Amino acid sequence: MQFPPDAPTLLDAIAALLDDEVIGAVPADLQHRVRVAANLSRLVARESRLGELNARRQRRTMLAYLDGDVTLTDHELAAELARRLRHEDDPARLDDAWRMLVLIARDDLAVAKPGHDGWEGE
Amino acid sequence: MTGNDRLADGLAGCLGATWDRQVKVSGLSTMTAGARRHNVVFVADDGAVGRRLVATIVPPGETEINPIDVEANVRSLAEAARVPVPHVHAVDPTGRWVGAPMMISEHVDGETVPRRVLRLIAEHDHGEVVARQLGEALARLHAIEPAAAPAGLQAVGDQPPAEAAIAALDEAMDMLLQARPAVALGLGWLERNLPLPPPRRAIVHGDVRNGNLIVGPDGLRAVLDWEGALAGGDPMQDVAWPALRMWRFREDHLEVGGFAKRAPYVAGYVAAGGAFDPDRYRWWKVQGTAKWALGLASQAMAFIDGRVPSIVMAASGRRVAELEWDLLMLIRR
């Protein structure tokens, strides 16, 4: 077991370094990429905190919708779900699918872009 | 001789051959560039006048959607139809002058970086003016006689544009490394809500949005980046694209580019002769959102397989969820 700080804390520290010190010290044409790197460090920090929990929850949700085979991997479940949704036309099943996918998207956004799900307009 | 000297010599040679006189090139600097192409601003002096110009250079090995000479031709066609564009001075599709295909056009002052565009518009309080001008520009483009499309311009073909768009998205879905159920739901929605074909097909730009506009204190000055122009398209494809949430840059309540609501934009489009159809507009917004979700996924794949080893491409994969959320909001009942 590693001595602290833990991985997400280290990634946050890397992001702070990139944002606070490195951006100002590099040429203009490199600054955008440094900013992207800082954002990615923060994102991966969130992923290491939330990723496993989200993956388990998403798996349960997909299995429940599909009444699926528990031996399938997460990717196989997503592929089966995508295959069925592409041609689903039962309105009730479509509504259920929409609600399920909103929950999954909220989980993904909690990692990828917190707050993006605050807008529900057109 | 430095790389910049060689580039200056090549640009001077190309302009000299086009204008049939001696040209001196100086003051080269790289502009804030797109992810794929290099834009170099410089001064060209032919002894009578010094002009600020921009060379758009396609890096070797880069896939072009339309060849750069075709792009230049469609841009000139749009210019003749009074769409604001930077005037094209010279084109070299062969790479003879600078070692890569390129186009040289007039430099137009103004802001292009989306957040700076939004700051400028807020400062001058002319978001509605810019939106109206953008609507007018699109209507003028769409009014061009379809038969005038330059030879070699990519085209939709005989299939109705919406059906062709679904087929392209299905193909892109099949290429994904990981299935995306939300996008699959969106594709199903597109098929169930397929619109009637447009009453009139048009040359469409394909990527008009905040980020491909030059805006000044007086309003819209130019529409940039015509490389994805398409013949035989549905005009509503173009009208819907700048209204995607992705191009609002956190100004979500302002549907058009984060700087205006829909009304002045549509008013400009209609006033300049465009026929606005709210149903097809919505359909193309859903299509555009699904398309950009898959576009981001494909950028991430280009990083994973080593084609484009850029951290920006790598980050695109983690942005797919944003588009999935937007897609779900657009198709909710």
Image (cartoon, coloured by chain):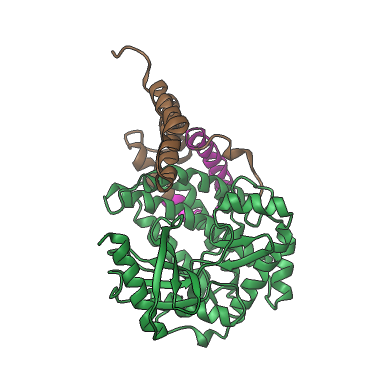
Chain colours: A brown, B green
- Examine the residues drawn in magenta and state their main secondary structure: helix
Tell me if I can see residue B333 in this picture.
Answer: no
Magenta part of the protein: which range?
A83-112
* Residue B92 vs residue B284, the one in the foreground: B92
- Where residue B89 sits: x, y (%)? 46, 78
- Indicate the quadrant containing the N terminus of chain A: top left, top right, bottom left or bottom right: top left
Q: Residue at x 38, y 52 (%)?
A: B299
Q: Quadrant of residue B281?
A: bottom right
- The question of residue A19 being in magenta is answered with no
Outermost residue on the front side: it is: B47
Between residue A117 and residue A35, name the one nearer to us. Answer: A35
Apparent side of residue A43 relative to residue B281 in the rendered image (left or right): left
* On screen, residue B104 above or below B4: below
Q: Who's the residue at 42% across and 84% down the image? A: B19
Image side of residue B54 versus residue B17, left or right? right
Q: Is residue A36 left or right of residue B277?
A: left
- Give the vertical position of B66 relative to B33 (above or below): below
Q: Position of residue B21 (x, y in %)?
A: 39, 84
Residue B177 higher or lower than B67, as above or below = above
Q: Which percent across, then down, holds residue B33?
A: 44, 56
> Can the viewer see residue B107 in this picture?
yes
Q: Nearer the viewer, residue B194 or B155?
A: B155
Task: Give the total of numbered labels.
Answer: 0
Residue A69 placement (x, y as % from top left) = 36, 37
Q: Quadrant of residue B109?
A: bottom right
